[in-house]
Image (tube, rainbow, N blue to C red):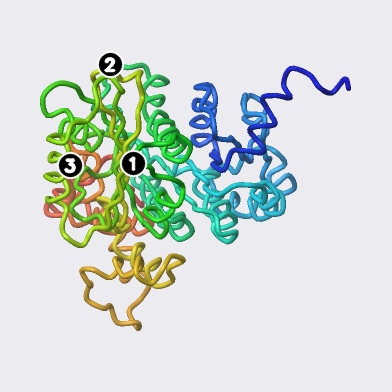
Amino acid sequence: MGYLDDSLPLELPLVDSSIIKVIGVGGGGGNAVNHMYRQGITDVSFVVCNTDNQALVKSPVPTKIQLGVDTTEGLGAGGKPEVARQAAEESIDRIQELLKDNTKMVFITAGMGGGTGTGASPVVAKAAHDLGILTVGIVTIPFAFEGNMKIRQALEGVAALSEHVDAILVINNEKLKQIYPDLELSNAFAKADDVLTNAAKAIAEIITVPGYINTDFADVYSIMKDGNVAIMNTGYASGENRITKAIEDALNSPLLNTNDVSGASKILLSLYCSTTDQIRMEEVEQIHEFMSKVGENVQVIWGASFDDELQDKVKITLIATGFDVSDIPGMPANVAKAYAAKPAMSAEASRFFDTPKPEVVPEPQPVEEVELEPVKLNIEKTYEQYYGNAAQTGTEQQVEPEPELPVFTLDDLEDEKTLKNVENIPAWKRRLMK
């Protein structure tokens, strides 16, 4: 009986009772799960997956999968999503085995724009989705200073992951710099990790905490299944109009990709109050006022539970789904359209990809004109919409894809018009051919 050590009572409930699994893929995803694991959240099990063996060794999370033992030899993907994809496919049996327990819902978190998170997370998501598990992605996109190439790679990664998840939340790292300019970098990243922590904790509470107006996993499943792009957050408030203020607090998280729920097709509201300061009937009208703003055709599920730690506060967890991948600011239109053409979600969910319908581009046109140029244009829009003042102002040269940068001869540079054009190109992009 020597195996009955102190860790046994902690492990058994985790395996037998937890139906929620949080999987961190790559460096950013692993860091988020490490942060969450240290918070001691119950009713959730944790997994880290990485091509970098050193990162796995440093993780406090007990359950780990080294992706692509033969493909990368534990040395990482070198920032190449394709290598990471191959590594994940090499380890697919281990991933599937991990999911074939009592798992009913999986959060997959990753940092988009690098190698492992971008390339491996869609493979992990597909493994879960194919098993009929409710699959939710929570991802970050890069800082503005990381450049167009990484941002474009990140957005394409978001689109690829969205193909194999029921719902996806996007967190913008650039906003961390704007919102928390005085925070140390490590602490700023922890703010983004808190979004994942709060989301998984809120879902666990909805499923496991009985309410006097009860919500359960079936309700969560109904809201998030084929939910496409989602927002999910928790808000708190006290005093007059506390319901309205708590809803606003939940919606106004600056790290979420949108706070406009008018485009949602399904919403779940879970209310919490103390037994000593319960929600009054007159306060329920504030919920009605909120719902009247989101439209008549929105599916709404709501519940209410007690939490005496709140005292005079109310807490509201809000989940809104049904947004389109192309609703993410700056998402390249051709990338969203490509994934719309082969949806992994329901036909009803995928219809959002076609609204509004872009003009059909004739097939015979070269790939460079049909695909690469719109991506570049949309990346510039990404800088404006996602990154504010960090947006690059451009000339017509910037519209061209990076591999097609103009090459100037010395004769060209003797022309006054050419010189003016060169001055408008960032110095790091100029090339001189003798």
**Which label number is shown at residue 213?**
1
Q: Is residue 322 visible?
A: yes
Q: Nearer the viewer, mark 2 or mark 3?
A: 3
Q: Which residue is mark 3?
A: 287
Q: Which residue is nearer to you in this view: 121 or 194?
A: 194
Which kind of residue does numbered mark 3 sit on?
A: Ile
Q: Is residue 376 visible?
A: no
**Which residue is drawn at the image coordinates 40% and 35% (left, top)?**
202
Q: Secondary structure at mark 3?
A: helix
Q: Secondary structure at mark 2?
A: loop
- Which quarter of the image is occupied by the N terminus? top right
Vertical order, 159 against 345 (above or below):
above
The 10 Å Cα crowd at callout 1, few under 14, some 14 to 19, many 20 or more, is few
**Which residue is drawn at the image coordinates 18% and 31% (left, top)?**
280
Where does residue 36 sit, x and y in percent of width and height?
50, 27
Q: Which residue is mark 2?
A: 182
Where does residue 10 sit, x and y in percent of width and height?
66, 25
How far apart in space, not on screen, are marks 2 and 1 (Cα)?
A: 42 Å
Numbered circles on residues, count:
3
Q: Which corner quadrant of the image does residue 403 belong to? A: bottom left
Report if the CB atoms under discs 3 and 1 are less than 8 Å apart. Answer: no
How far apart in space, not on screen, are marks 3 and 1 (Cα)?
A: 14 Å
Vertical order, 374 against 424 (above or below):
below
Which label's residue is closer to the chain start, 2 or 1? 2
